[in-house]
Image (spheres, helix red, strand yellow):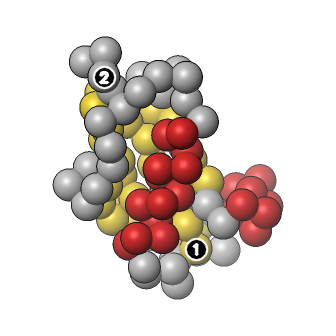
Amino acid sequence: MKVSVWDTYVSREDGKQMHFDILVPSDLKDENTIFNFGKSYLKSKPFATKGLTSKECRFCHVEQASESIEEAIRSKGYYIIEMENCN
């Protein structure tokens, strides 16, 4: 499965900046749906953030997903790769 990678940077209320990627099927083009996936992910965190808009989340590239990522996307609609200050 080809997936679109959306590079995302969100400010936490403690001053740190989160960096994570939202992976979605490459044929999903609706930005509001993608942003809502990111917002859903942020709600699962025990700390507050300052929000997520097109300013914080941008399309980066398309790549081939691994089997485990494909399974997660089929189940949930998206997959998050946590990179910085996500926990």
Q: Residue at x 26, y 49 (%)?
A: 56
Report helix, strand or loop for mark 1. Answer: strand
Residue 37 percent coordinates (x, y): 53, 58
Residue type at numbered disc 1: Pro
Of callouts 2 and 1, the N-terminal one: 2
Residue bearing the label numbered 1:
25
Return the mark for residue 77: none
Residue 19, relative to residue 46: is it above or below?
below
Residue 46 visible:
yes
Residue bearing the label numbered 2:
13
Direction from residue 17 to residue 1 in the image, left or right: right
Q: CA distance from mark 2 to mark 1?
A: 31 Å
Q: Nearer the viewer, residue 46 or 30?
A: 46
Residue type at numbered disc 2: Glu
Q: Nearer the viewer, residue 4 or 76?
A: 76
Quadrant position of the N terminus in the picture: bottom right
Q: Residue at x 54, y 39 (%)?
A: 43
Task: Classify mark 2: residues with Cα within 10 Å, few (<14), some (14-19) or many (20+).
Answer: few
Q: Nearer the viewer, residue 80 or 67?
A: 80
Which image quadrant for residue 65?
A: bottom right
Residue 1, relative to residue 66: is it above or below?
below
Q: Nearer the viewer, residue 55 or 4?
A: 55
